[in-house]
Image (tube, rainbow, N blue to C red):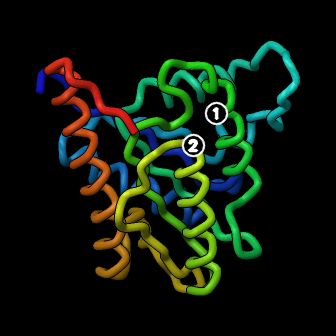
Amino acid sequence: MSRRPVILGLGGTIRAGSSTEKALLCTLRRAEALGAEVRLLGGTFLGALPIFDPRPSDPTLEQTELAEAVRAADGLVVASPGYHGSISGVIKNALDTLEMTGRDPQPYLTGKPVGTVITAAGFQAGGTTLMALRNIVHALRGWPTPFGATLNSANDLFDADGACRDDKDAWQLDTVADQVMEFAMMRVAQSEKGLGVSA
């Protein structure tokens, strides 16, 4: 490949230093170690996004930045906390905002690998939130990775340096990154051969 795959991390909460954003950063660090160029749109960015309004209007700078970042990405990692059995409002709003790409030649998340990371205070909420996020990725024509990570935030997940305290959690996040990168590298290689990848 003549260029590095671009992996976009989208997620976190509007609370600085959230476990969700730390999990996302761990996943992006792994992708970077595997050769990716990574970009983070985290909780601060998500908090600045206006509520998506489907009526015709000029997009804000933040909405345009999100749409352009997704267009440029070869793969994504989306990380959400589990709120009441599903994804958080700020994550749903960001994904709704991708309607801006609906008239693109490759709309939404078409053909892109999407890793899913969930943090929730209990395994039941983690499971239902993971399923909800995977369903949304499917609806947006993305390819959810075979493995999705669910971390129990009832435990103290990260040390002072932001690394996972539990080896099993680290394995989960590494596996998500590995699978996103495997597919993203195939996308880049095929696009450079002029083959393209479609959903």
Q: Quadrant of the N terminus?
A: top left
Give residue 53's position: percent from left, percent from top: 85, 31
Give residue 139's position: percent from left, percent from top: 59, 48
Residue 140: image tag: 2
Residue 38 lies left or right of residue 44; in this view the side is left
In this picture, is 26 found above or below 59?
Answer: below
Q: Residue at x 36, y 56 (%)?
A: 27
Q: CA distance from mark 2 to mark 1?
A: 9 Å
Residue 81 lies left or right of residue 145; in this view the side is right
Give residue 12's position: percent from left, percent from top: 60, 54
Residue 180 lies left or right of residue 193; in this view the side is right
Give residue 97's position: percent from left, percent from top: 70, 34
Amino acid, disc 2: Leu
Q: Quadrant of residue 5?
A: top left
Residue 1 or 135: which is nearer the viewer?
A: 135
Residue 176: image tag: none
Q: Earlier in the sequence, mark 2 or mark 1?
A: 1
Amino acid, disc 1: Leu
Q: Quadrant of residue 51?
A: top right
Mark 1 packing: few (<14 Cα in 10 Å), some, or many (20+)? many
Q: Residue at x 37, y 58 (%)?
A: 145
Q: Quadrant of the C terminus?
A: top left
Residue 98: image tag: 1
In this picture, is 40 found above or below 152?
Answer: above
Q: Residue at x 62, y 76 (%)?
A: 128
Residue 14 lies left or right of residue 33; in this view the side is right
Label 1's element?
Answer: helix
Q: Quadrant of residue 163?
A: bottom left
Q: Are marks 2 and 1 in contact (CB under 8 Å)?
A: yes
